[in-house]
Amino acid sequence: MIENKKLLIVGGSYLQLPAIIKAKEMGLQVAVADYNSNAIGASYADKYYNISTIDEKGIYEAAKEFCADGVITLATDMPMRAVAYACEQLGLNGISYDTAIKSTDKGEMIKAFESHGVKHPWYFILEDIEQLNRFDSKIMYPCISKPIDSSGSRGVVLIDSPEKLRESIFYSSTHGRKKGVIIEEYMRGNEVSVEIVVINDVVHVLAITDKLTTGAPHFVEMRHNQPSRLGDKNVERIKELAEKAVLAVGIKNGPAHVEIMLTEEGPKIIELGARMGGDFISTHLVQLSTGIDMVKAVISLACGEVVDLDPKFNRGSSIQYITGDAGYIKSIDGIDLASKIDGVVEVTMLKNVGEQSKEVCNSLDRLGYVIAQGSSVLDAMNACEQAIACIKLEIEESKLRI
């Protein structure tokens, strides 16, 4: 128990809920800041601040008024700038504002990788589409276009020909806060993420997660499994690259979620977040596969307490997302049956009856998920698949394209 300490959590959605609940269990007083007064996390908090998660001065003022001993967020990138600003101003454990910029602006991020010798894809940064004339002849196909400052696969698209270049760049530019986009090498291989906690410049790798995406054109993540099945040699190479990437952007104290592609040329960095991973990877899968409570560790670190990163066991964990045809959801059946499958830890629908089911273009289009644990990663994956087979969705096709 951590008594007489206060934690400000930036964001009150279901993504931050595991940290809010954990902090309360640890005995902390918890404040939540979110522009949405109906955010689910607000009702769990001791104090609620009606402030946007990207309002840097507002978050700082809230942390100061609350006398916070720590400030964190989970799973989302842009609030990291407000978190870093507050921590820097108040002298709390966390990343610097410079590191927050490098870990949320994909252009600054890849330049930091380049300057520190972190193996990365070739790239071009466009602040405006008209800059394309400078190097359109140098672009090789296929390639990827994505916004400089977005996440959750929003605005990510595969470009397979010069004819689609401008159209794709415009698509990416509409999904970021800034109009800038980055064009990168399309890397083929096995995608993983590395879940990390850095303490006083020492990088601790907690787990490596194998990923499955929808593939081209949007590469939305659909399944995550721990531990990785890529073999000891590849795992070590991935760990080395992840450590270099984290230090390249300047993370000295705090979590990191590093995405890497294992290509035929070896591992190459995709990008990273200076925060815990989303998609329940850090909040659920790490603990289910290793016994390490990453949420508790990150809260303890933020509040200047002793951090426990010792693995308790070696098991398998998996999350698989649910999708459906385009249309309106008429009925959802089989949730109770799916929940009873051996190894299943959680079954949750993110869309309800009456809501739209869409083509999966970003993470918000997924309909639900199943999380499972097993004695091996294959057991966990099989449990997820059995559970999803139990869930029956009746979807009425929309006459209009959505």
Image (cartoon, rainbow, N blue to C red):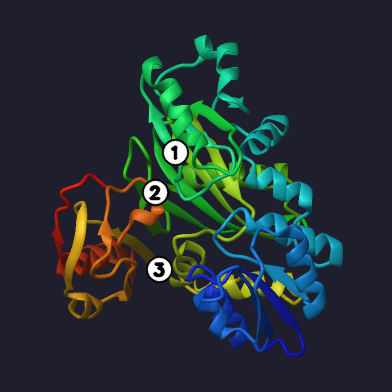
Residue 288: which quarter of the image?
bottom left
Which residue type carries mark 2? Asn
Which residue type carries mark 3? Arg
Q: CA distance from mark 3 to mark 1?
A: 33 Å
**On the image, numbered disc 3 is attached to which residue?**
315
Q: Is residue 134 left or right of residue 81?
A: left
In front of the other: label 3 or label 1? 1
Q: Is residue 253 visible?
A: no
Identified at 27% across, 64% down, the residue is: 355
Q: Is residue 204 left or right of residue 88?
A: left
Which residue type carries mark 1? Val
Q: Is residue 323 visible?
A: yes
Neighbours of disc 3 within 10 Å: few (<14), some (14-19), many (20+): many
Rendered-image quadrant of the N terminus? bottom right
Q: Is residue 387 above or below residue 253?
A: below
**On the image, numbered disc 2 is attached to which residue?**
362
Q: Is residue 374 above or below residue 122?
A: below
Q: CA distance from mark 3 to mark 2?
A: 30 Å
- Picture coordinates of residue 327, whole percent (x, y): 20, 55
**On the image, numbered disc 1 is attached to which residue?**
156
For the residues bearing labels 3 and 1, Cβ distance under 8 angstroms: no
**Mark 2: which secondary structure?**
loop
Q: Is residue 191 left or right of residue 346?
A: right
Residue 301: which quarter of the image?
bottom right
For the residues bearing labels 2 and 1, Cβ distance under 8 angstroms: yes
